[in-house]
């Protein structure tokens, strides 16, 4: 008799009408087979799906060029569907579930004709973790199938878990005809279901990532008492050998991956990586907050990645690991058959093909690699991988960091006064937009907890959930805000960033352990300069002061902007947020 899973797959096949169905098992042989199919058979826009790169320098690595209109998440085409609009909140596009399904069914009808449907049974979280979830994604593109095999744990164990639990998270994906007018990413949180059509790009198409592990999981977290967050998980080892675990939330393309894999510029300190994008956090039996990374790979921004900024990532990308490594929309050095992007070491090679495969002339200031070009690589390739990365219980979190891209106003680092005050600091966070989504880049927008595009329900309820969880924890993590991106009068970043960020992390763990005092300001505690290790940095006094200044006049407009943002949530906004708002306002 057909299982629940088989029945569901059959139903989707009846709708999408593929020529064949292929059940993925996660094996190494399968990876080779899928890559071969992507090189020799499947086409997007008439182009092969994969191009084999120089295997001597980049073992097991392949270049993928997407359709030129399909290069980033499309937030305006992303919906959450509940029977009532209020539950989705002003932070989401909303559609009635029945209406959405009727529309999507038409787009899915026969969309896999002549194609293979790949069935990917996978786990988010290591299979033996009580916090892990079993899922299945269906897709009609080998690129998506290979990417899911890198980013999640694909294998039979997921099928076993599904038959034990009788439940799984369902994802149906088709690249469709790539018409941007027929591109939709639809979430049905009440049914643990995602339907995505018309895009093959990362967060639109790898449904285990933003769609499930944030939008649907945040809803499950609200119902079940946990948090699904857009956060790095990392361990910071100090010179005494003690490891402190922290998480850090930053909007897309604002520095998470670089932080998670940082090579410390301070001797004696070492970073251990557990995750670079998503954290699921539960209150453990000891009353502390414990975090697991549901993912198993990195889908990282290529431009700016170099031996200077992120040597550990280059080691990761060049390692000959179990899984293939993919580059998407980078440029190609046509002499050496190696990937290339802006901000890689050295000058641009003489003969480059741009991200669309055309000869690059370097003229008109056009970039050779797409600004949102990315790599997909297994976390198990990382030399910084924490030995706790697969611990089913996760790691206990001592501090949480929230950071955005702010060229002015926000200090390098400050600490909130307590949990409630910290939740407010995170909720009023703003950041300048990046190329990770399709929209105008460099515009300041409010992005609470770096979750604006990913919170799968009304953010008023989300803030309340954060406040409530704080009350349930015996020892809530300390909350900090950071900003690596403050600029001087000439528009240069003041702070060197990358490996030097360890200086800020050191202050953070020193504070978490109660080792240093700070200076109180209306927004929280900033470091006293003498407590920051700044040896060997070349920042002039005026700029140094700017990094830590909290000027009353400058904050007026920010506070006004925050009020407007919070007001959108009406009476769903918890009173604690307004208490904090009024305290901040009255301090100015
Ligand atoms: P997503 O994968 O979209 O979630 O991005 P992310 O938050 O992981 O950002 P990532 O670490 O990939 O960095 C994005 C861009 O910011 C890259 O071009 C980096 O080179 C740059 N960047 C990262 N850290 C720093 C820093 O400390 N200082 C400066 N100036 N730039 C940074
Ligand atoms: C992000 O945009 O935050 C990413 C890339 O991590 S994506 O998978 O497209 O969401
Ligand atoms: Mn991200």
Image (spheres, rainbow, N blue to C red):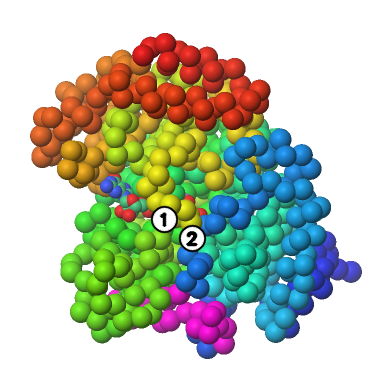
Residue at the image point whose x is 47% and y is 65% from the top: 71
| Quarter containing the C terminus | top left
Q: Tell me if residue 70 can be seen.
A: yes
Rendering coords of residue 445 (x, y %):
45, 39
| Residue density around tag 2, few if under 14, some if 14–19, many if 20 or more, within 10 Å | many
Extent of the magenta region: 41-66
State the residue lying farthest toward the bottom.
40
In the depicted structure, whether residue 112 falls above or below residue 397: below
Q: Is mark 2 within 8 Å of ligand 2?
A: yes
Under circle 2, the secondary element is loop
Label 1 close to label 2 by CB (< 8 Å): yes
Relative to residue 450, is residue 528 drawn left or right? left
Does 143 lie within the magenta span? no
Q: Earlier in the sequence, mark 1 or mark 2?
A: 2
Relative to residue 346, is residue 341 drawn left or right? right
Residue at the image point whose x is 37% and y is 61% from the top: 371
Rendering coords of residue 130 (x, y %):
64, 44
State the residue lying farthest toward the top.
586
| Quarter containing the N terminus | bottom right
What label does residue 13 carry, if any? none
What label does residue 435 carry, if any? 1
Relative to residue 399, is residue 344 drawn left or right? left
- Image quadrant in which you'd find residue 264: top left
Q: CA distance from mark 1 to mark 2?
A: 7 Å
Residue at the image point whose x is 29% and y is 39% from the top: 407
Relative to residue 565, is residue 491 drawn left or right? left
Q: Nearer the viewer, residue 133 or 230?
A: 230
Residue occupied by mark 2: 72
- Image quadrant in which you'd find residue 87: top right
Rendering coords of residue 110 (x, y %):
76, 76
């Amino acid at each position: 008799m057909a299982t629940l899973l088989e029945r569901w797959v059959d139903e989707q096949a009846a709708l999408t009408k593929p020529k064949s169905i292929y059940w993925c098992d996660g094996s190494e042989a399968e990876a080779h087979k899928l890559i071969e199919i992507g090189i020799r058979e499947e086409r997007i826009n008439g182009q092969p799906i994969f191009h084999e790169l120089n295997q001597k320098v980049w073992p097991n690595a392949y270049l993928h060029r997407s359709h030129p209109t399909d290069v980033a998440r499309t937030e305006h085409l992303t919906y959450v569907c509940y029977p009532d609009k209020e539950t989705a909140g002003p932070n989401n596009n909303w559609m009635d579930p029945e209406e959405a399904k009727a529309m999507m069914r038409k787009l899915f009808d026969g969309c896999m004709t002549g194609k293979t449907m790949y069935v990917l049974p996978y786990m988010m979280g290591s299979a033996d973790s009580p916090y892990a979830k079993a899922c299945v994604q269906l897709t009609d593109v080998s690129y998506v199938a290979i990417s899911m095999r890198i980013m999640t744990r694909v294998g039979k164990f997921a099928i076993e878990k599904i038959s034990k639990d009788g439940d799984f998270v369902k994802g149906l994906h088709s690249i469709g005809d790539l018409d941007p007018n027929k591109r939709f990413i639809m979430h049905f949180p009440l049914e643990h279901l995602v339907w995505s059509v018309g895009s093959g790009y990362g967060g639109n198409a790898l449904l285990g990532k933003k769609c499930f592990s944030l939008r649907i999981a945040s809803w499950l977290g609200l119902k079940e008492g946990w948090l699904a967050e857009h956060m790095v998980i990392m361990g910071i080892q100090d010179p005494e050998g003690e490891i402190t675990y922290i998480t850090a939330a930053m909007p897309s393309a604002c520095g998470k991956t670089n932080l998670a894999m940082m090579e410390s510029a301070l001797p004696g300190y070492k970073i251990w990586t557990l995750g670079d994008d998503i954290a699921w956090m539960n209150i453990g039996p000891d009353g502390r907050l414990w975090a697991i990374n549901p993912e198993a790979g990195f889908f990282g921004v290529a431009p700016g990645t170099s031996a200077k900024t992120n040597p550990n990532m280059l080691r990761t990308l060049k390692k000959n690991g179990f899984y293939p490594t993919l580059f998407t929309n980078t440029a190609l050095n046509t002499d050496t058959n190696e990937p290339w992007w802006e901000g890689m070491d050295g000058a641009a090679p003489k003969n480059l093909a741009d991200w669309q495969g055309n000869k690059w002339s370097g003229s008109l200031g056009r970039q050779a690699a797409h600004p949102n070009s990315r790599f997909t690589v297994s976390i198990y390739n990382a030399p910084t991988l924490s030995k706790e990365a697969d611990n089913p219980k996760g790691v206990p979190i001592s501090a949480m960091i929230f950071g955005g891209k702010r060229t002015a106003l926000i200090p390098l680092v400050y600490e909130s006064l307590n949990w409630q005050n910290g939740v407010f600091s995170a909720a009023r966070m703003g950041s300048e937009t990046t190329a990770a989504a399709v929209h105008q880049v460099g515009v300041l927008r409010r992005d609470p907890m770096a979750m604006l595009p990913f919170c799968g329900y009304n953010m008023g309820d989300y803030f309340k959930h954060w406040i409530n969880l704080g009350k349930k924890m015996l020892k809530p993590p300390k909350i900090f805000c950071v900003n690596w991106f403050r600029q001087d009068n000439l528009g240069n970043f003041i702070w060197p960033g990358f490996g030097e960020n360890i200086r800020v992390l050191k202050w953070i763990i020193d504070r978490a352990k109660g080792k240093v005092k700070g200076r109180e300001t209306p927004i929280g505690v900033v470091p006293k300069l003498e407590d920051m290790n700044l040896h060997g940095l070349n920042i002039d006094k005026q700029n140094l002061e700017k990094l830590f200044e909290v000027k009353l006049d400058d904050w007026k407009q920010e506070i006004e902007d925050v009020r407007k943002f919070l007001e959108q949530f009406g009476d769903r906004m918890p009173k604690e947020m307004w208490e904090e708002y009024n305290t901040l306002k009255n301090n100015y």
